[in-house]
Amino acid sequence: MKLNVQLKFAGNAEEAFLFYKNIFNTDLSPIYRYKDMAAMGMDNIPKSVENYVANIMISIGESKIIGFDVSEEGFNRSKNQDTLIHITPDSKEDAKRIFDALSENGKVVNPINQTPFGYYGSLIDKYGVGWEVLIENL
């Protein structure tokens, strides 16, 4: 079994995924836009969203983060961050690099630091996505 995460964006999924692609040094899937969905019988896509991303994806290890755009009217991200993406890098150096990159122009909730349960930090990135970075004490 694998667990993947799907995120919605208010028209900036492609920008966000290019940002994540660089941080995690991974490949980006082909980008499918809503206008491409006409070939699948979805020919009633409003002009205002036809260039929005219908599907975009990156892989991080065995996991995938999948994204798509919705109209601003259909977008609502919780202000109290009910959901966070939790990532476990291979080293403290990598954890710090990832944390610093994700928090650029975002909001650090808990600075990355050694805690009783591990090397941990949490943040909300510039796209409003919540992240936790943790290397557990073993």
Image (cartoon, rainbow, N blue to C red):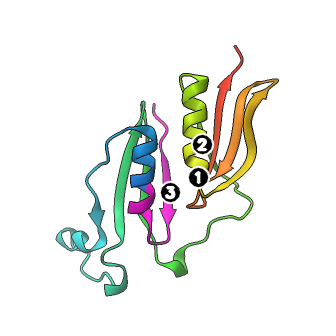
Q: Which amino acid, by three-letter code, is at mark 1?
A: Glu
The residue to which callout 1 is attached is 104
Nearer mark to the viewer, of 3 and 2: 2
Name the residue nearer the viewer: 102 or 9: 102
Give the x, y percent position of residue 56.
35, 55
Residue 100 shows which numbered tag?
2
Q: Are marks 1 and 2 in contact (CB under 8 Å)?
A: yes
Q: Quadrant of residue 124?
A: bottom right
Residue type at the position of mark 3: Leu
Q: Is residue 97 left or right of residue 22?
A: right
Q: Nearer the viewer, residue 62 or 118?
A: 118
Image quarter in which the C terminus is found? top right
Viewer-nearest of discs 1 and 3:
1
Give how far across and how far down residue 84 sits, in percent.
64, 48
Tag 1–tag 3 contact (CB < 8 Å): no
Q: Amino acid at mark 2?
A: Asp
The residue range painted magenta reads 1-16
Q: Quadrant of the N terminus?
A: top left
Label 3 or label 2, whichever comes before in sequence order: 3
